[in-house]
Image: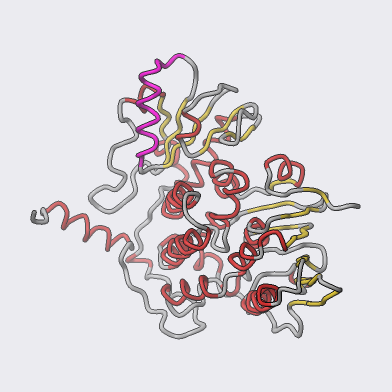
Amino acid sequence: MGISERQVRLVRAAGRAGNFEMFDASVAGSDIAPAPVSSRCSLAPGPDRLGEMVKTITIADLADGAAHAPVLNEDGRLVDPVMLVDIQPGASQHAQKRARAFAEGCDRLLIGVTSNVASRLTAAVDLTLSTADVGCETVAVAEPEREAHELAAAVVRNPQAALSLRQLLRGNVRLPVRTALEMESYAYSTLLGGLEFRQWLEDRGPLAPMATADEPLLVGRTDDTLYITLNRPERRNAYGREMRQALCDALRIALVDRSVNQVVVDGAGRSFCAGGDLAEFGTTPDVATAHFIRTTVSAGLLVHALGNRIEVRVHGSCVGAGVEIPSLARRVVAAADASFRLPEIAMGLIPGAGGTVGIPRRIGRWRTLHLALSGQPLPAETALRWGLVDGFADP
């Protein structure tokens, strides 16, 4: 079967939109060069058009295929990347069954809104906001409709990142952890070359690199226990290249030395880990190199491999990698002041240190998506109730 003229136009439009656009970042250590403003294609509308973009549909609408129009138009732009679904009683069993089938096969992100109504549809959509918890597929909020529009706005601002995360969360839970981490890295590395991340880099501007640390990590041993402490308290233990490499080296000690029966990981200072060093974002020479670095120097994979031999003790701010890596441990103990946040969507990226793998295995894909789209901190009490942490540390 030949390629139609319309398909050719779609491929060309996708290239103009940045989906296949090449960029010059051949010098190691340099920021990924933003595209000239004249060639940049806005993927999201301005705030004045946000209300137009977010549609609310009923279960009957979903059953009739309202969410199944093509998500890409002929210019390669994402159309209605998110829709709100009003999940209320009244729909027939037949309509609910068809709606679930359409939701499972939908290309756009679906946010359910309900008033404490238990429905099998909540498992099929990507996230449901309710006035009360009715299972791991829901998040209880005071005003579900208002928050649903706030989350939808985050999707409209960075639709490529949001939809990439949706795809990963739906697929990764069925994969072995190593394979799932590789899929996460492919998606993350792809987004490094996307327009959304380039725009974030441009808005952020250049940052001074973090100074070299004498000891980014403290490692000690008492009897059969290996203690590892993140040691950049002046930077809230930002997870940069030095710390990543040192942490992986330390974790490998326990993997090869079977006399180590327990590994305890914690952080010095006021925070366990404030996430990646922002000055290093976008500094890999190309996205393929970024993928291989992410998969060959993966603290999350090593933490998972240690199984029940490792315990991570967190406190203060746990941001990005600071919540993603611990989520892959068998046991996570939190101080009462701990809070957990995933800020990557607002940067045009997705969690890339194991967050699409470990976090949904603990709290489900629905609540993981809420954590990422909202970008808001999750307090320790809620993290314990959801299962993101396993217990509280003694005062």
Q: Is residue 245 above or below residue 314?
A: below
Residue 9 percent location from the top left of the image: 17, 56
Total marks in image: 0
Residue 158 seen: no
**In screen coordinates, is 23 left or right of 236?**
left
Splitting the image into 4 quarters, where does residue 143 fall?
top right
Hey, which residue is sitting farthest left in the picture? Answer: 2
- Residue 384 in magenta? no
Q: Give the quarter of the figure containing the N terminus.
A: bottom left
Is 91 colored magenta in this rendering?
yes
Predominant secondary structure, magenta span? helix
Q: Is residue 147 above or below residue 261?
A: above
What residue sits 78% from the left and 59% below the top?
313
Identify the residue at horizontal 73%, vertical 55% (top origin): 332
Considering every residue shown, the one lying at the far right of the view is 395
Which residue of the protein is positioned furthest toward the front in this rendering? 259
Q: Position of residue 378 (x, y in %)?
A: 69, 46
* Residue 10 quadrant: bottom left
Image: 266 above or below 213:
above
Give whichever of 85, 215 is nearer the camera.
Answer: 215
Q: At 36% from the left edge and 74% from the top edge, which residue is drawn?
A: 23
Residue 275, horizontal then vertical, whole percent: 65, 64
Find residue 210 and report its horizontal and vertical position in percent.
67, 78
Segment colored magenta: 90-106
Horizontal side, residue 139 vs residue 214: left or right? left
Question: In terms of depth relative to the viewer, which is nearer, 201 or 380?
Answer: 380
Judging depth in this view, the residue of 48 and 352 nearest the camera is 352
Residue 84 appears in the figure: yes
